[in-house]
Amino acid sequence: MEILITNDDGYKAKGIKVLSEIMRHFGSVTVIAPKHHQSGMSMAASLGLKQIAYRQLSEEEITRDTYSLPDTGSKMRGADCCGIKWSYLDATPASCVKFGLNIPFSDRFPDVVVSGINHGSNATTASCYSGTLGAAAEAALNGIPAIGVSLATLDPDADFSAVKKYFPGIFGMIMKNLPARKGIYYNVNFPDMPADRIRGIRTGHQGNGRWIKEFIPWDPGIYSAYGITPEMLGQSSIPSAEDGETLYMMAGEYADDPDNRQDADHWLNRQGYIAIVAHNIDTTDSEETLRMRKAGFDTDF
């Protein structure tokens, strides 16, 4: 099985290193991840005929730059280690998938694209903004099975033991039960809790809610609070205001919709379940389309 992996936290993140170690047991893994942090990019593509830097990572760069996991019993051999080929692209997550399908997989598409493991939940309306899911959607747009995987914590040193324990089984179930229809991608969200506290797996739907009080005054302390450096975000230094500018940052509070059903993905996570939601790149609202037809919108001139 040929597996393409990407994420939106950048190639140095712990989540993508853990995911690559999980997926190498299923086949040959190619990692093409953003050079810098790309959260919130959804399906944004790096357009404009600008230069896009690509690098295949050497053994030294893999060891030095990617997250160091405990010894897995394998030794690095350049950019190809135990079926894992590492590289980065200075572009959005969806662009990483586009690049993969046009360059290393130009002759034959990968059998599956797996995006993650994201540091932070991509349940409920976060799925609309997620670069993790944007990469999965790009794969689905090209008829390739795709899965986005997220853990509900922003901790850069997050405990992914629950994902390591349960995601292989989830991946196997998805791949053995793929539908004939194209355009589907799967959003798998893990609650932030030890594996022995997880109650099970549930299929659900995208929860409803919205973000409020989203813009707050810029606080440079946010970097140290989450272990983030300006370099991770593609910046050379902490930003400073120009004359007349006031700096803000997006943070905000999540306002839950009380009308959510019990199988809303974020509610399932709160109850200790791993939530799986099937999304489709066809965003047509079939129910509303039928209502409009019945209301007489269809007219001949």
Image (tube, rainbow, N blue to C red):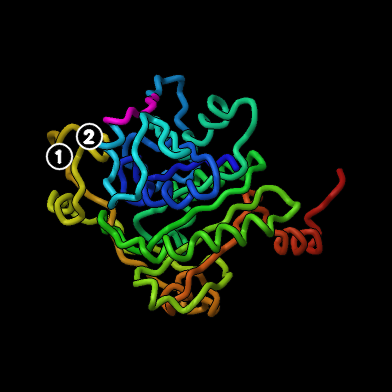
The answer to whether any part of residue 124 appears in the image is: no
How many C-alpha atoms fall within 10 Å of the one at disc 2: few (<14), some, or many (≥20)?
A: few
Q: Quadrant of residue 211?
A: bottom left
Residue drawn at 57 percent across, 26 percent down: 102
Q: Is residue 298 left or right of residue 62?
A: right
Residue at mark 2? 235
Check the picture and name the quadrant holding the C terminus. Answer: top right
Which residue in the rendered view is the most extreme toward the front?
73
Is residue 207 depicted above or below 133 in this figure? below
Over which residues does the magenta segment extend?
54-60
Q: Position of residue 75 (x, y in %)?
A: 34, 39
Q: Which mark is residue 238?
A: 1
Residue drawn at 40 percent across, 19 percent down: 51
Q: Quadrant of residue 67?
A: top left
> Are discs 1 and 2 less than 8 Å apart at CB?
yes
Under mark 2, the amino acid is: Gln
Q: Position of residue 57 (x, y in %)?
A: 35, 29
SS for tag 2?
loop
Give the CA separation, mark 1 to mark 2.
Answer: 7 Å
Which residue in the rendered view is the most extreme toward the right?
300
Depth check: 4 or 83 in front? 83
How many C-alpha atoms fall within 10 Å of the one at disc 1: few (<14), some, or many (≥20)?
A: few
Is residue 57 depicted above or below 225 in this figure? above
Depth check: 259 or 292 in front? 259
Q: Is residue 114 left or right of residue 251?
A: right
